[in-house]
Amino acid sequence: MNRKIIITSEGCSILKKKIVHLKKEQKETAERLSLAGGDVKENAEFTLLEAKNLGLLREIEESENILEKAELYEETNNKSSLAELGSIVTYLWINNQKKSTIELTDDVTADPPGKISVNSPFGEKLQKKKVGDIIQRGKDKYQILEIKQKFNNY
């Protein structure tokens, strides 16, 4: 799938640090791999290191591709009243009357609790919605109560 990749400056910074860490780990793994020698067919350490090294190389390549193709999100002067990247959305889960607040982020920074990617199923449903809108997700219904813009400098 060739979807547009949008990344915040925070996400860009995190991804760059991740790449540096992965390259260091891959270099150390490659050095250990070269020392593991012996009969490769019966060398469990060699097999494990080889698999780890390939996984690291793949993850480095994927991360570098994201950085290369990503469009940096403008994080200033957002006056929109719609939910979008950088919005902090408070909603009511109508089915059980529970309130929750989440931040819509890029894919890179979406891991911590309280943050979801704009590309996740729920994040996609929230985008371009306004206060008062009701979103249905399966049997569940959610009503948007408040939208704040994280990057609004006003």
Image (tube, grey):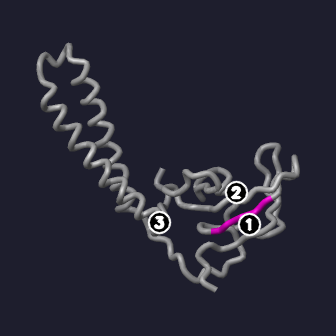
Q: Looking at the picture, how far across and down is residue 150, in whole percent?
A: 62, 72
- Mark 3–mark 2 Cα distance, whole angstroms, equals 23 Å
Characterize the local packing of mark 2: few (<14), some (14-19) or many (20 or more) Cα atoms within 10 angstroms. Answer: some
Q: Amino acid at mark 3?
A: Glu
Location of mark 3 (residue): 10
Q: Residue at x 57, y 61 (%)?
A: 105
Q: Residue at x 68, y 59 (%)?
A: 102
Q: Looking at the picture, how far across and down is residue 4, in whole percent?
A: 49, 61
Q: Amino acid at mark 1?
A: Lys
Q: Which residues are magenta?
A: 87-91
Q: Residue 105 or 27: which is nearer the viewer?
A: 27
Q: Looking at the picture, how far across and down is residue 127, in whole percent?
A: 67, 63
Location of mark 1 (residue): 129
Where on the picture, by quarter, is residue 148? bottom right
Q: Residue 144 or 115: which is nearer the viewer?
A: 115
Location of mark 2 (residue): 125
Q: Is residue 103 left or right of residue 34?
A: right
